Image (cartoon, rainbow, N blue to C red):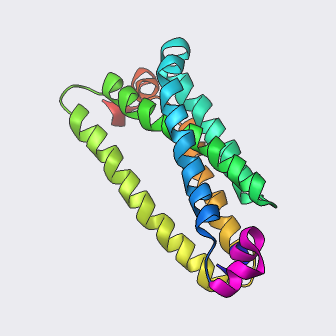
Amino acid sequence: MPRFLLEFGGTASVSRGSLTSAVSGSIVGLLVVGCFFGALIAGQAGDRLSRKYSIVLFSVIFSVGGAIQASSISLVMLLASRFISGLGVGALSMLVPVYQSEIAPKEIRGRLVSLQQWAITIGIAVSFWINYATDIQLSGSSASWRIPLALQIVPAFILVVGKNPKYHRDNHHSDCR
């Protein structure tokens, strides 16, 4: 993505065809550092706020980070947003399986948590193809990298507005019995 290279690495990165190792490592590494701290604080948040509300809180944090990433105009802004998103990813990686195992019937608990990992893997593949398509179709535009970064907000939005399965059961939705 030449526009991404130009925005965050300058003309030297465009001519080289990649970001410097320091910049690339920082972009990746700050997400991982955020994940570490997110996972550390998720347990306390889950105990104090409940798993459900902690998932909503960290989904909002992840969405804020994703929105800042998609609208980044400087490397510092991108790096800060990667850390913020990492907080959400780390916390959600800890909270969601715990919440699923707490609310799922014991007969399907293991399958449900395994299904979550499968969905993450499918999501990675879909993100690759979205990234590839935007790079091919929007190559000369900053939209080629902004759209994939903005689309990561969609799953977080679903976590925020989604209803608890017990809500559907308690409100007599026949497909949840």
6 left or right, relative to 161: right
Q: Is residue 172 visible?
A: yes
Q: Quadrant of the N terminus?
A: bottom right
Q: Is residue 55 above or below residue 25?
A: above
Residue farthest to the right, as pictured: 73
Q: Is residue 161 visible?
A: no
Q: Is residue 132 magenta?
A: no
The image shows residue 147 at horizontal and vertical percentages of 67, 66
Of residues 132 and 39, which is closer to you in this image? 39
Residue in the image at 46% along x and 66% along y: 126
109 left or right, relative to 62: left
Of residues 137 and 93, which is closer to you in this image? 93
Residue in the image at 56% along x and 16% along y: 49
The quarter of the picture where residue 94 lies is: top left
Residue farthest to the top, as pictured: 48
The image shows residue 116 at horizontal and vertical percentages of 35, 45
Of residues 22 and 116, which is closer to you in this image? 22
Q: Quadrant of the C terminus?
A: top left
Q: Is residue 175 above or below residue 53?
A: below
The quarter of the picture where residue 142 lies is: bottom right
45 left or right, relative to 74: left
Q: Is residue 136 above or below residue 41?
A: below
Q: Is residue 109 above or below residue 86?
A: above
Residue in the image at 63% along x and 70% along y: 20
Q: Main secondary structure of the magenta part?
A: helix
Residue in the image at 58% along x and 67% along y: 21
The image shows residue 63 at horizontal and vertical percentages of 65, 44
Total number of numbered discs in the rendering: 0
Q: Which residues are magenta?
A: 5-16
